[in-house]
Amino acid sequence: MSTHDHTEEHHTGLRVYAAVCLALFVLTAVTVYVAKFDFGDFNIVVAMVIASIKASIVALYFMHLKFEDKLTWIYALYPLFLLSLLIGFTLMETFTRVPVIK
């Protein structure tokens, strides 16, 4: 029985890291700029979308998730699925709560 060591090395160039760094700087500036505006109930939504984009960039390039196999992607995305369930059930309970009048 033979085993194959299937390891591929992906070399990300300095140009890609510079572009990622620039994108993170720009998104941080966008976060600071957007914080000056009042979006009402959507303040947290706007902040979370920008933060999610930045976290995705970090995971893809600095953690090299972009070059990983499907099983690693499953392990990386499973906690996000659990987080969405937690937030979803919490919001569902919050929005269907009947106010108690004393």
Image (cartoon, rainbow, N blue to C red):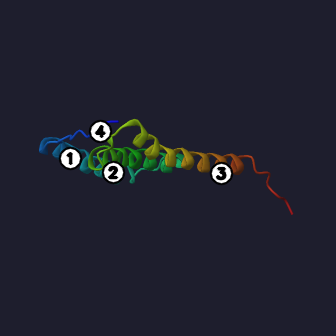
Q: Secondary structure at mark 4?
A: helix
Q: Secondary structure at mark 2?
A: helix
The quadrant of the picture occupied by the C terminus is: bottom right
Which label sits in the foreground, 2 or 1? 1
Taking the image as shown, residue 6 lies to the left or right of residue 37, namely left
Residue 90: assigned label: 3
How much space separates mark 2 and mark 1, taking CA atoms?
Answer: 16 Å
How much space separates mark 3 and mark 2, taking CA atoms?
Answer: 30 Å
Mark 3 and mark 4 in contact (Cβ < 8 Å)?
no
Residue type highlighted by circle 1: Leu
Mark 3 and mark 1 in contact (Cβ < 8 Å)?
no
Earlier in the chain: of badge 1 and badge 3, it is 1
The quadrant of the picture occupied by the N terminus is: top left
Residue type highlighted by circle 3: Thr
Residue 67: assigned label: 4
Residue displayed at 41% across by 46% down: 52
Residue 22: assigned label: 1
Q: Which of these two is toward me, 23 or 67?
A: 67
Earlier in the chain: of badge 4 and badge 3, it is 4
Residue displayed at 29% across by 45% down: 64
Taking the image as shown, residue 36 lies to the left or right of residue 18, namely right
Which label sits in the foreground, 4 or 3? 4
Earlier in the chain: of badge 2 and badge 1, it is 1
Residue displayed at 40% across by 43% down: 72
Which label sits in the foreground, 3 or 2? 3
- Which residue does the numbered mark 2 point to in the structure image? 33
Are there few (<14), some (14-19), or many (20+) residues within 10 Å of tag 2? few
